[in-house]
Image (cartoon, helix red, strand yellow):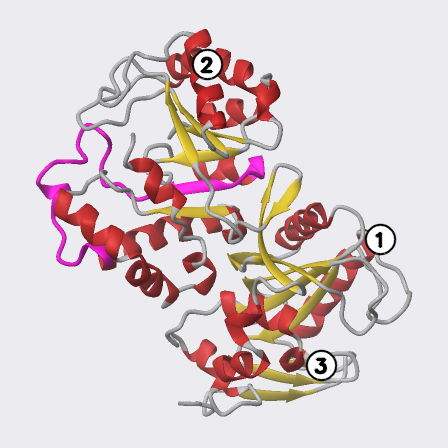
Amino acid sequence: MRETSFCALLHSTPDHSVEVHSADQEVVIALGSNVGDRLNNFNEALQLMKKLGINITRHACLYDTAPAYVNDQPQFLNSAVRADTKLGPHELLRVLKKIEQEMGRAGGIRYGPRPIDLDILFYGKYQIGSDILTVPHERLWERPFVMAPLMDLLGSVIDSDTIACWHSFSTDSDGLFGSWEKLGGESLIGKEGMKRVLPIRNHLWEWSEKTSVMGILNLTPDSFNDGGKFVYVENAVSHVRLMFSEGADIVDIGAQSTRSMASRISADEELDRLIPVLEAVQGMPEMEGKLISVDTFYSDVASEAVKKGAHIINDVSSGQLDPNMHRIVASLDVPYIAMHMRGDPATMQSSDNLQYDDVCSQVASELFSRVKDAELSGVPAWRIILDPGIGFSKKTKHNLDILMGIPAIRAEIAKRSLAVSCSCTYWTIKKEIFR
């Protein structure tokens, strides 16, 4: 159903505009870049937006896209964010133009190359028409590279008056979902002109192209599967070499046991175990084209591991065991695996933590809550990978229900955020079976 009764129309001039200052307005801002380090341009723009009164609450996925209108130019990186702001619409426009100028955007060919492009797609419940600003963006409906990230920012369920308004502005009777489907919808993703990508190391990884194999290296004396086998650097390196020869793309190194009832060691002790092995693995010739993930729930360990060359942080607690984890991960600019677990390894299999009415629905809801916290701390959804936590706070039946219920988990998360639902991956499930 399209609802318009609570939507407003503003016609104004930039000098005598009707500005909305009384309360925060929810806005959608599109980002594009095809000059220089595109991802760094996004990060810089987001930081400037936060400093200038634009509080980012959600991030879309990242898309590597072919140029439109002017074809003879480099590929674009596209995304979008939802944010709250007290800035009026024309004031918001001025702030965004200021950011573009500070980042080096100057006059040039229309639709031509640019280090950053920031467009207001939606502003609260308002349609705006003036000499310099039209909201919704007038060419929104014809641009898959804008519609794809916009859809990421929505849930499949219309859960607020503002979202209902945005749907009502669509040129399609079925709202934004109908407009997206008319362009081709999800079938467009993965084709040459539009690829959904995960930034990792110094490149953009189209992780939907293949299933990546993660090998597990436990440096602990008490892990149930291989405890004590790889506490010496030489043994650890030999095992990593073996896993790479057998087809592993990623090695996940853990120096803290997360088996049931495991005692927790300090961050300093974890680092003492981890760093010598991490440095040795990083120096292996076989590391060419491979990735290192570090399994930790300590922010200090995560920070030091990335300094020493780790490419991914894998947190079994999703930030629940260290209040600084999300803030630190936001500053590290690496992918973040957020896993579902209740309690900690010592308590995760308690009777209270094993109570589920619907394990897939509840895992989805609890994971989304943790990812939302991470996003509000500055970790964009395009860097987050979800892991439902096979074997953690789960009975055998729960594990089997999750393995069979991945589509249900994704659908449940998609009700709230299509971008976060895209972060569910299968290799993170498979790795836990062998921990």
Compute the Cα span from label 3 to label 1.
Answer: 28 Å
Q: In the image as oriented, which residue stretches furthest toward the left?
A: 351
SS state under label 1 = loop
Residue ID for mark 3? 17
SS state under label 3 = loop
Q: Is residue 179 one of those drawn in magenta?
A: no
SS state under label 2 = helix
Q: Residue 238 carries which label?
A: 2
Q: Which amino acid does label 3 sit on?
A: Ser
Residue ID for mark 1? 104
Magenta residues span: 331-360
Q: Which residue is drawn at 50% across and 37% down?
A: 329
**289 vs 367: above or below:** above
Compute the Cα span from label 2 to label 1.
Answer: 49 Å
Determine whether, in the image, residue 413 is placed left or right of residue 166.
left
Compute the Cα span from label 2 to label 3.
Answer: 68 Å
Res 309 seen here: yes
